Image (cartoon, rainbow, N blue to C red):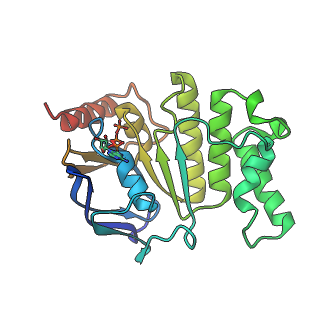
Amino acid sequence: MSDQIKVQVRHLTKKFGDLLVLSDVSFDVMDGDLLCVVGPTGCGKTTFLNSLVNIYDTTSGEILLDGQKVDTKKQNIAYIFQGNSTMPWLTVEENVGFGLLYKPLSDAEKKERTEKYLEIVGLTKYRKYYPKQLSASMLQRVSIARAFATEPELLLMDEPYGQLDIELRFRLEDELVKLWQMTKTTVLFITHNIEEAVYLGNKIMILTNKPTTVKTTLINELPRPRDIADPQFIELRNKVTELIKWW
Ligand SMILES: Nc1ncnc2c1ncn2[C@@H]1O[C@H](COP(=O)(O)OP(=O)(O)OP(=O)(O)O)[C@@H](O)[C@H]1O
């Protein structure tokens, strides 16, 4: 983490017709943060990410990446969401290398990068497999390797492990922490799962119910690897749970 601001969200408001979803939301994401975002169901977490990458127009306000208006053609932003986003007609290694196809890298560099991330996520020996031959967790690993292989300035993750069983989720969470520590990528991770937010984040941002604003952001300095049974872990988890309650 550094003291440089990576993402600036300023007075962001998003309406769908008469429905006010995001209401004058402002916050900063610092370079190298692994910021977990939690909030009540339907408060606009996905809407926020979609606004960030210009899938949605904002009603008012702005989002800046490195001080510039977000331009996904110029800035390297990776987005991983729930479910399978692999390309079924490509092998595992072709999927992992896909984001590098049009990067100004030599073939040798592309190959080396692909190898590196295949190895980190433990898929080297499945490199020639096609997505239909893989389990759900392996598919998510392909997506993660593909995203990290592009060495993005910003990685957006929207409930990426929501459909996985608990053991696989734990393994992928550890992998994400490893990759984040290694690459120092700024990660914005959206989750419903409070335990996951406390396990992963160096910061946890809690959103209110609609119309949504930022309730608070907690700094999470629990040592890693984190232990979900540790009393301090449980204390922080309970604190986030209390803060998230809107009833
Ligand atoms: N394209 C759209 N058109 C109209 N309304 C939308 C659209 N996308 C989202 N909404 C509404 O905006 C609100 C926020 O939705 P969003 O999916 O961003 O919330 P979320 O916090 O990600 O939800 P969840 O907790 O279920 O993942 C919801 O009330 C949803 O119905």
Whether residue 220 is visible: no
Considering only vertical position in the picture, is 139 above or below 75?
A: above
Q: Is 30 displayed left or right of 133 in the figure?
A: left
- State the residue in front, 139 or 71: 71
Q: Is 189 displayed left or right of 101 in the figure?
A: left
Ligand 1 lies in which image quarter?
top left
Give the quarter of the image for residue 234: top left
* x and y, in percent, of residue 162 in the image: 48, 31
At horizontal 81% and vertical 58% (from top left) the residue drawn is 112
Which part of the image, by quadrant, shows the N terminus?
bottom left
- State the residue in front, 52 or 20: 20
Whether residue 55 is visible: yes
Single out the residue that lies furthest toward the bottom: 68
* x and y, in percent, of residue 148 in the image: 63, 54
* x and y, in percent, of residue 130 in the image: 79, 35
Which part of the image, by quadrant, shows the C terminus?
top left
At horizontal 37% and vertical 28% (from top left) the residue drawn is 230
- State the residue in front, 167 or 106: 106
Q: Is 179 displayed left or right of 207 in the figure?
A: right
